[in-house]
Amino acid sequence: MRISSSKIFHALGLTAVVVFSLFPFLWMVAASFKTQGDILASPPVWLFTPTLQNYAEIFADTKVSGAIINSLIVATFSTLLAVLLGAPAAFALARYEFRGKSDLWFWFISNRMISPIVLALPVYLLAIQTGLLDTHLVLILIYLTFQLPIVVWIVTDQFKSIPADLEQAARLDGADQFTIFRKIYLTLGAPGIAVSAIFSFIFSWNELLYALVLTRRNVQTAPVVATSFMSGYELPWGKIMATGTVIVLPVTIFALIVSRHMVRGLTMGATK
Amino acid sequence: MSDAATTAARRKPNRGYGRWTPALFLAPAVLTLLLIGIYPTLFALVTSFRRYNITRPREGFPFIGFENYANVLSDSTFWSSLFLTAKFYVTVLPIQVVLGLVIALLLHKPGMGLLKSLARVTLVVPLATTYAVVGLIGRLIFNRDFGVANQFAGFLGLGPIDWLSTPDGAFAAIAIMDVWQWTPFCALIFLAGLSMVPGEIEEAARLETSSKLALLRHVQLPYLLPGLTAVMILRSADVLKLFDMVFVMTRGGPGSATDLISIYIQRVGFRIFDLGTASAQAILLLILTIIISRLYIRLLYREVH
């Protein structure tokens, strides 16, 4: 009897975890299928006739679709750059000993902690001076400040797990370090590189502060546009929630793919 | 540098094993970070010593020494904003740690395979939700007239709460959304800690004592401590940089009830356009962050990479 009651509590507890994790998210998704009348009903309605009106409206709205395209461009190119620059650095950190290595490592990790407002101020001024304000390029470059450390960390970790014998065998065959990097590390390290790319993509897709400060009309990203709906008297709640759902859905799927690595990605590997 | 590096590499019989080889691999990433990270930081440092209000360009941007820093350090709103950030941290952290630990223990307990996997996977959802969208959800849930939070409050016999337009209500609302988003982070870290306990030790301890608390304290706690340290330090850095969710939900208001440090600096810089003062504040924030990340590395990276 005691065993079964403990089992019941276990099941109830786990169900509570599922409800806790999903409720706010599902409440948004539900609101995205409600009419304005249903959303404004008090007390809130739990059962309603779903409508696709909100989605029809946001997909017809060039502001929303444009913003999603901007987000895609920025997140894709900054991720590509982060991997292109980060993977060789990870190779050096995983395979060589050199002076200043721990300082370098400290610097990479510190970047994970710095508030974006610290860089947003000077980059805003520099972007005005160079004419880069409101371009994709400025966002792609600034996103590298947090993407590169993530890529370098995860990929270094993966590269370290590649057995050194493989490398020695290749050396005996006369392969140089560049060949070894390409043929052995990039190939066998591909899973880690993919995970790091997914994290990079998620972080840059989700970013708001830089995008808010460094864009005007042309390259507003999805979070900026979703935020901009939040002014005026009669808020278009259904549209707002539909936009929110469209923004969150792709990254949620990505996050589920890398869920096993979530902790490593968020702590820079301090706990395994 | 790359020329010297390639010649150095060529002189060796085996190409690519020179002293400069690591530098070649590192150079692209390091140069990029110098350009996009260090250069703007130095620029901010220079700006912090100038009077720099871009709404008044006629006055020029003269150097004024430490005047901005003196102003910031004697500015009571800056200090109250830092104090509020600290208050937010000590409010959310204990809740996240306790809830996170409970969730981790539920997930670590044997049995309930399918439900457990489901719970484990759903924990990722809050973590992945775009921070700005968390703010939008907060606006929906905590709306005074039709928000579901007031429906729940009603079940508990509480009258409709004016969440977002009263100081305490707004602070509570952003704290609840932060707890929702970051408790899973603590849970997953603690779960990783629990699974490090060697199976036979845990089995033996379970035979010795039936007290879950004794098991937690004597067997599992040592494995949880590194995770707890990581959580405490990372969350402090995260609260210092918290912007998106709060900006969307309250813009720091009502009044200055949710004016956390990053929100405050953003307002000084981009609403008042006093970039000299804002830069000085940002540099002070940066120094604080560097101390925190030093601590993080000192305590958590045993092997220096």
Image (spheres, coloured by chain):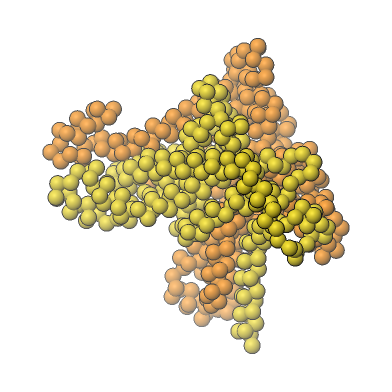
Residue A81 image position (x, y, % from top left): 41, 40
Q: Colour of chain A?
A: yellow
B38 in relation to B231, above or below: above
Residue A42 image position (x, y, % from top left): 83, 58
Q: Is residue A43 left or right of residue B234?
A: right
Residue closest to the eye, A113 or B305: A113
Q: Give the residue at the far bottom of this rendering.
A: A1
B73 in relation to A104, above or below: above
A108 in relation to B227, above or below: above
At a point 35% along the width and 53% down the height, the residue shown is A190
At a point 37% along the width and 41% down the height, the residue shown is A84
Residue closest to the eye, A236 or B17: A236
Q: Colour of chain B?
A: orange
Q: Is residue A192 left or right of residue A62?
A: left
At a point 82% along the width and 64% down the height, the residue shown is B156
Q: Quick one: quadrant of the N terminus of chain B?
A: top left
Residue B2 image position (x, y, % from top left): 27, 29
At a point 51% along the width and 81% down the height, the residue shown is B207
A6 in relation to A79, above or below: below
Residue closest to the eye, A240 or B130: A240
Q: Is residue B167 left or right of residue A136?
A: right
Say whether residue A111 is visible: no
Residue B196 image position (x, y, % from top left): 46, 65
Residue closest to the eye, B200 or B256: B256
Determine the image quadrant of residue B288.
Answer: top right
